[in-house]
Image (cartoon, rainbow, N blue to C red):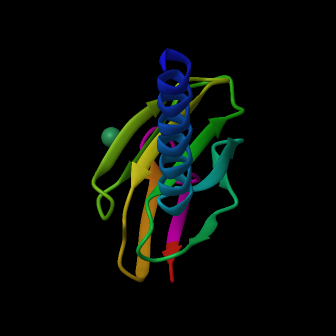
Amino acid sequence: MIILKHVLVIAAILMAELTLGTATVAAQDTDVRVVIKDHKFVPAEITVPAGKKIKLIVENQDATAEEFESYELNREKVVPGKGQIAIFVGPLSPGRYPFFGDFHKDTAKGVLIVQ
Ligand SMILES: [Cu+2]
């Protein structure tokens, strides 16, 4: 009987893991990456799907720090030189969400296009 119980417990755990695994896939974030190079965002335009959680990875290839900032996305976060950060936004409605580098406003400009 003890062995049977163990089998049932293991089966229950496996079922739970399968269910969780499915849920994780269904709710999966959309990952997008943007690079800062020579105080510019590359690419300057990023298109993402509407109604999804977005994980925006900002990789700074410059030696100096930059600050990712967007009024429309209500985000502001320093990206260390030669470092990277993740910014979580969404789910978003379709539209254009500009962002810029607060330390190099003249050159570091971009837009998140949600469609
Ligand atoms: Cu700022």
Q: Which residue is outermost to the top? A: 2
Residue 109 falls within the magenta-colored stretch = yes
With 36 as the anchor, is 8 left or right in this view?
left
Magenta run includes residue 50: no
**Quadrant housing residue 32:** bottom right
Q: Is residue 103 above or below residue 44?
A: above
User: In the displayed structure, does residue 69 sit left or right of residue 48?
Assistant: left
Residue depicted at 65% across the width and 50% down the height: 33
Residue 22 position by quadrant: bottom right
Q: Residue drawn at (51%, 68%), measured in percent from left and top?
A: 112
Corner quadrant of residue 3: top right
Q: Which residues are magenta?
A: 102-112
Q: Position of residue 83 (x, y in %)?
A: 62, 25
Residue found at the far front of this picture: 1
Majority secondary structure in the magenta region? loop
| Residue 68 point in image, percent of width and height | 45, 44
Side of 66 where 31 appears, left or right: right
Q: Quadrant of ligand 1?
A: top left
Between 79 and 27, the one lying in front of the other is: 27
